[in-house]
Amino acid sequence: MLALTNVQVMYDRAIEAVRDVSLDVAPGQIVALLGSNGAGKSTLLKAISNVLYPEEGEILHGEISLGGDSLLVMPADEIVRKGIVHVPEGRRLFPLMTVEENLTMGGYLQSRGDVSAALDRVYKLFPRLKERRKYTAGYLSGGEQQMAAIGRAMLSKPKLLMLDEPSLGLAPQIIEQIFETIVSLNHEEGLSILLVEQNASLALRVASYAYIIENGRVVLDGEAKNIAGNDDVKEFYLGYSEGGDRKNFRDVKHYKRRKRWLS
């Protein structure tokens, strides 16, 4: 489905944010993309969506394709038409518009009848949004805003949903509700999901495959259950360290990076 091969991203042709990253998302799969702040996770999502330009970012090398079709030459709106929809970090709602107005903005490529049906579907996923549909979006709680951001994305009828830090700043109970919905969309509707998340434990619980990025490079990837069972991952990302010092994979002498881009 989605394939990235040896992707390199630079900002202002001076700062390398992503270096030789290769990853795949298969149809119907949840793939987790894990890493610390500044690792390059959000940059990868922006590169896929072709929205790097406002920050003077540029793909200098590599290929991004969906079903064999290159996305590098497509404008952002055409990528949405292809079925890739991005829910950015921080929700990015229109704060002065109502909840329903925000939701319908996601359906600007759809017919009026399709938008009406999609709204009903979103309100079934998130009953709280139906209750709040006439409220000004800027006055919603963080959890309600995240529901609205995901709902808006669903109005575009995605084949691949990219979620950037959906748990950020939310209470544990709301996080569980959001992730239950994510799993439901995947299991019941076959929606493919690329999930950027710092809550590694939760991400690995719902994903089938995972990639770990450090300093713009993939340093480990594999089946999520195997990643979750890796001793180094337990120490560096899941909080099971016996010592008190923070480490990264570069500090582990026995660790060998899988250089798939050289194979």
Image (cartoon, grey):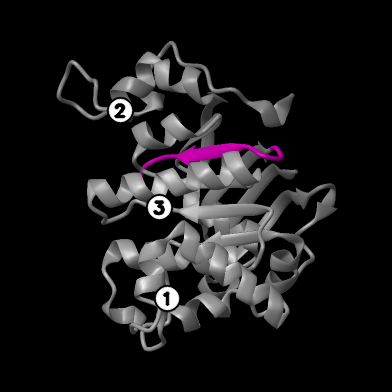
Answer whether residue 84 is magenta in the image: no
Determine whether the residue tagged by mark 3 lies in a helix, strand or loop.
loop
Q: Amino acid at mark 2?
A: Leu
Q: Residue at x 35, y 79 (%)?
A: 137
Circles 2 and 3, Cβ within 8 Å, touching? The answer is no
Q: What segment is highlighted magenta in the picture?
A: 26-39
Label 2 vs label 3: CA separation?
A: 17 Å
Q: Residue at 31%, 80% (x, y): give it.
A: 138
Tell how many labels.
3
Question: Residues under labels 3 and 1: Cα distance?
Answer: 15 Å
Mark 1 and mark 2 lie on one chain; the one further toward the N terminus is 1
- Dot 2: element: loop
Amino acid on which the number 3 mark rests in the picture: Glu
Q: Nearer the viewer, residue 72 or 112?
A: 112
| Label 2 sits on residue | 238
Question: Type of residue at label 1?
Answer: Leu
The answer to if 37 sits in the magenta stretch is yes
* Kind of element beneath mark 1: loop
- Quadrant housing residue 72: bottom right
Residue that mark 3 sits on: 165
230 relative to 59, above or below: above
Q: Which corner quadrant of the image does residue 12 belong to?
A: bottom right
